[in-house]
Image (cartoon, grey):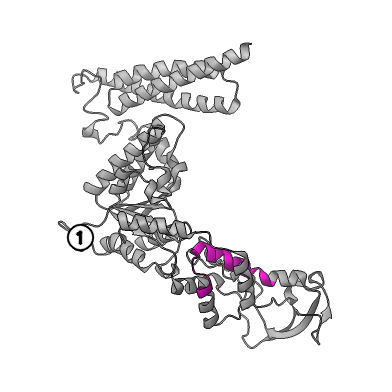
């Protein structure tokens, strides 16, 4: 009987501790340090009792970590308040315990001892993974089609950085852009192109970066994200699946979700009206699920539609890359005509399936024949295209140490390639009898793609497209 009672006791202590520590954080933010210190002390007692009764090792570790953090913050406040008392004659201390000389506007909100308080340091450390250290190396030309979207992004991102003199007075660049459309149409891929071309600090965040189980921490993460973006401007904050963070408000949503949305509204309003050099770039598949106030903060809304025929043709070419292929320009156009309704992601999957057809021919072959062909580099398989075409996979480039040495373009070699049993030169062999360096893979042919089209069907329905078109007519801006 003692065990259930212990669990209930632990739950009560933990809930109460979280409730009190939220009050402490609120007072801390308001710079009411005396009251914050008292609340931290009170909360720590509840956390220690919760730790005592908790049986789950993982939860005990989480409680212990938070206990150490809040204890450290309480110690900092204690030292700060002691210094305030010592220097009372030189500094004006308010009745509520806040100090004008430290932690207020005069000092830029930084503590004197180490510049930034430990809690803020931890929040920023967690967000540092969202900053792209290396550019994705995706050029505008790598994005097939989407000319309207590319032009709008160049206008909003590239031109203000390259020609800042054009954007003065009332002419200001867009501060919030929402890209919406069916899944798989290249929204995230466009963001990678922006990150490459803009040459600015790029923050790529999702709900997992900003949502925390600890009360009050999620909205502080949002606040720190925007603070870091302002410090590192020109900068871009890309929020993928923004609807998961800023969906429509309703009676059933949690208090934490409501707080996150409120903080986003406050920060985006500040970025839109007061700050220069910070762009918020959002992407969503369900724009109608966004909160109306959040939707208003995205001044420019860009519909990312399904690719047209020319874009689909280009996607096939990009995805095939340098793989040995017998397709002609006419074949690529025929494939584009047969894949109306496919997204860029669908075409990427389709081509990957077609690329496997030569491999399947090798696996199933019962006969091979000898052929003479130009000598190929040993590592040529590494350079085969897994091209992007608005999918997320980029062409693989082998490291310099792995690239093959140049070969004589006129040199030839005898290889083995799969053939039908009725071929006059057929030899009864299986793939296990063929050495790696002697194998010549069959080239991609039209039938490989036609077979893949039968296997890979479009993922977006006509109803999905219709709903996006309706949203564009009502609220979207192309």
Q: Residue furthest left?
A: 169
Residue at the image position 55 percent from the left and 24 percent from the top: 60
Front residue (pair 63, 428): 428
Residue at the image position 32 percent from the left and 37 percent from the top: 262
Does the magenta portion include 350? Answer: yes
The quadrant holding residue 96 is: top left
The quadrant holding residue 116 is: top left
Q: Secondary structure at mark 1?
A: loop
Note whether residue 135 is visible: no
Front residue (pair 114, 256): 256
Residue at the image position 59 percent from the left and 64 percent from the top: 456
Left or right of residue 66, residue 325 in this image: right
Image coordinates of residue 381 in percent, x first then y, are 64, 71
The quadrant holding residue 95 is: top left
Does residue 202 sit above or below 227 in this rendering? below
Note whether residue 141 is visible: yes
The number of numbered discs placed on residues in the rendered structure image is: 1
Does residue 24 sit above or below 139 in this rendering? above
Front residue (pair 210, 112): 210
Residue to which mark 1 is pinned = 167
Q: Residue furthest right?
A: 428
Q: Which residues are magenta?
A: 336-358
Left or right of residue 93, residue 340 in this image: right
Image coordinates of residue 219 in percent, x first then y, are 37, 36
Image coordinates of residue 264 in percent, x first then y, are 33, 41
User: Label 1: how many residues lie within 10 Å, few (<14), some (14-19) or many (20+)?
Assistant: few
The chief SS type of the magenta part is helix
Image coordinates of residue 108 in percent, x first then y, are 25, 36
Does residue 464 sit above or below 454 in this rendering? above
- Quadrant of the image containing the N terminus: top right
């Amino acid at each position: 009987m003692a065990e259930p009672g212990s669990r209930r006791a632990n739950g009560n202590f933990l809930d109460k501790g979280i409730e009190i520590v939220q009050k402490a954080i609120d007072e801390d933010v308001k710079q009411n340090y005396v009251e914050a210190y008292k609340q931290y002390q009170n909360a720590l007692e509840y956390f220690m009792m919760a730790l005592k009764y908790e049986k789950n090792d993982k939860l005990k570790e989480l409680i212990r970590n938070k206990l150490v953090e809040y204890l450290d913050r309480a110690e900092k406040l204690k030292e700060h308040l002691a210094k305030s008392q010592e220097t009372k004659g030189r500094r004006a201390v308010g009745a509520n315990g806040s100090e004008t000389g430290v932690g207020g506007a005069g000092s830029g909100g930084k503590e004197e001892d180490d510049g930034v308080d430990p809690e803020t340091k931890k929040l920023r450390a967690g967000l540092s993974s969202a900053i792209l250290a290396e550019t994705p190396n995706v050029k505008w030309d790598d994005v097939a089609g989407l000319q309207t979207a590319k032009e709008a992004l160049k206008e909003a991102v590239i031109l203000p950085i390259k020609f800042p003199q054009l954007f003065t007075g009332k002419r200001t660049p867009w501060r919030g852009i929402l890209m919406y459309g069916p899944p798989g149409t290249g929204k995230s891929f466009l963001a990678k192109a922006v990150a490459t071309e803009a040459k600015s600090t790029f923050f790529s965040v999702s709900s997992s970066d900003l949502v925390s189980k600890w009360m009050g921490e999620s909205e502080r993460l949002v606040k720190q994200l925007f603070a870091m973006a302002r410090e590192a401007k020109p900068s871009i904050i890309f929020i993928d699946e923004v609807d998961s963070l800023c969906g429509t408000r309703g009676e059933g949503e949690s208090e934490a979700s409501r707080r996150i949305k409120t903080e986003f509204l406050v920060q985006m309003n500040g970025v839109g009206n007061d700050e220069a050099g910070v762009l918020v770039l959002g992407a969503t598949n369900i724009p109608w699920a966004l909160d109306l106030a959040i939707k208003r903060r995205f001044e420019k809304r860009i519909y990312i539609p399904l690719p047209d025929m020319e874009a689909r043709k280009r996607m096939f070419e990009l995805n095939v890359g340098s793989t040995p292929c017998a397709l002609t320009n006419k074949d690529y156009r025929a494939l584009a005509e047969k894949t109306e309704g496919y997204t860029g992601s669908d075409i990427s999957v389709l081509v990957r399936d077609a690329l496997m057809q030569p491999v399947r021919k090798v696996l199933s072959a019962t006969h091979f024949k000898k052929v003479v062909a130009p000598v190929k580099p040993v590592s040529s398989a590494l350079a085969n295209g897994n091209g992007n075409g608005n999918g997320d996979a980029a062409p693989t480039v082998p490291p310099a140490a792995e690239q093959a040495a140049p070969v004589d373009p006129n040199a030839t070699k005898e290889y083995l390639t799969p053939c039908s049993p009725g071929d006059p030169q057929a030899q009864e062999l299986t793939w296990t009898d063929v050495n790696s360096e002697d194998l010549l893979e069959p080239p991609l042919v039209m039938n490989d793609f036609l077979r893949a089209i039968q296997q890979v069907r479009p993922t977006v329905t006509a109803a999905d497209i219709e709903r996006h078109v309706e949203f564009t007519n009502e609220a979207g801006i192309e």
